[in-house]
Structures are given as C-alpha cells and as structure tokens.
C-alpha cells in the first residue's frame, strides 16, 4: 500500500460514493446500521459477485453485516469496517486536490469526514465501492488490503 499522494480525477472517471449514515454504532447497539445503495442493475450484478467473495475476517475482525441485511453492504467488527457497493459517485471525486491511495492493485479516493474515521471509495471501477473505517483506523489503511483482492476479482476496471 502506498502513502497519500495528490489525486486529481477528471469528471468522466468512475469512482465511489458518499457514505450517508453509519448510525447505530453506540456501545448499546450490537450491529451497525447503514443506508443500502440503489445502483443500476448492471452495477448491482458486480456487487452481488463481490458479496460472494468478501472475506470472513478483515484486519482480524469477524464479519458482522450491518442492518438492514443486503448483498450491497457488509461489515466487520460491529461497524468498525463497513463496505457499501454501488454507491453514487462522491462529489469529492471532482476535486483535483482529492487524495488517493493504492492497495494491492485497487485505487481508492480518501476522504476524512469530521468526527469519524476515514472513508475510501474505489476509482476506475465499473461501480463504486465504499469502505468506511472507524476512528481507530485514522492512520491505518490495512483493512483495504484484505478487501482489494475481492474488489479486483469482481468489479472490473473502467479504464
């Protein structure tokens, strides 16, 4: 995985989406709650293929999918790591100053929303895959390494 570097994307380039809400992550909740994306059918098919390839553990955390259950979402560690597939293109992708990283052959745009951990959205893929990490991963992008192979295998490059 490489470190942060400037990441300018042309408007026509595919990329991922804005996480709308990771609610229900308080200590009294056992499962995270997320908004399920509604991609077009062709993109949903890539997401369904991805769902079949996702690992049981990511960064040592056990799989614990968010509510409501969907093939378009997955989670590990009771909301510590949340994946959403088929998200809309994030507005930040048009920012020539946006930052990105590469993890095991998959490019990701990095966003750092206030009050939460980092959010990554794939770039140059036929559908956008978003991964949100909780604050313990503020400086640790290793969960992306565990997710890169399934993404690379099931969501074709758009270039």
Image (cartoon, rainbow, N blue to C red):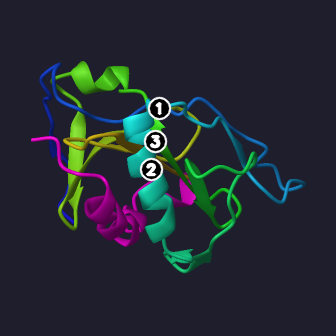
Counting from the top left corner in percent of width and height, residue 154 is at 32, 59
Residue occupied by mark 2: 47
Occupied quadrant, residue 100: top left
Q: Quadrant of the N terminus?
A: bottom left
Residue at 39 percent across and 72 percent down: it is 146
Counting from the top left corner in percent of width and height, residue 122 is at 30, 45
**Residue count near mark 3 (Cα–Cα under 10 Å), binned few <14, some 14–19, many ≥20:** some
User: Which structural element holds mark 3?
Assistant: helix
Q: Earlier in the sequence, mark 2 or mark 1?
A: 1
The answer to whether mark 3 and mark 2 are in CB contact below 8 A is: yes
Q: CA distance from mark 3 to mark 2?
A: 5 Å
The one of 116 and 69 positioned closer to us in this rendering: 69
Occupied quadrant, residue 76: bottom right
Residue occupied by mark 3: 44
The one of 22 and 118 positioned closer to us in this rendering: 22
Residue 134 visible? The answer is: no
The one of 97 and 129 positioned closer to us in this rendering: 129
Residue occupied by mark 1: 39
Q: CA distance from mark 1 to mark 3?
A: 6 Å
Query: Magenta segment, which residues?
Result: 134-159
- Is residue 156 shown in magenta? yes
Decide if residue 90 is on the left or right side of residue 11.
Answer: right
The answer to whether mark 2 and mark 1 are in CB contact below 8 A is: yes
The answer to whether mark 1 and mark 3 are in CB contact below 8 A is: yes
């Amino acid at each position: 995985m490489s470190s942060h570097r400037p990441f300018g994307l042309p408007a026509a380039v595919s990329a991922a989406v804005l996480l709308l809400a990771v609610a229900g992550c308080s200590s009294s909740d056992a499962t995270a709650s997320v908004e399920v994306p509604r991609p077009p059918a062709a993109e949903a098919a890539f997401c369904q293929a991805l769902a079949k390839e996702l690992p049981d553990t990511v960064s040592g955390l056990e799989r614990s999918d968010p509510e409501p259950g969907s093939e378009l979402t997955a989670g590990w560690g009771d909301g510590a790591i949340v994946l959403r597939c088929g998200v809309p293109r994030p507005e930040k992708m048009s920012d020539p100053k946006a930052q990105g990283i590469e993890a095991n052959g998959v490019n990701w745009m990095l966003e750092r929303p206030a009050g939460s951990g980092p959010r990554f959205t794939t770039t140059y893929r036929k559908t956008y895959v978003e991964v949100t990490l909780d604050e313990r991963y503020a400086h640790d992008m290793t969960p992306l390494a565990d997710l890169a192979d399934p993404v690379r295998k099931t969501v074709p490059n758009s270039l």
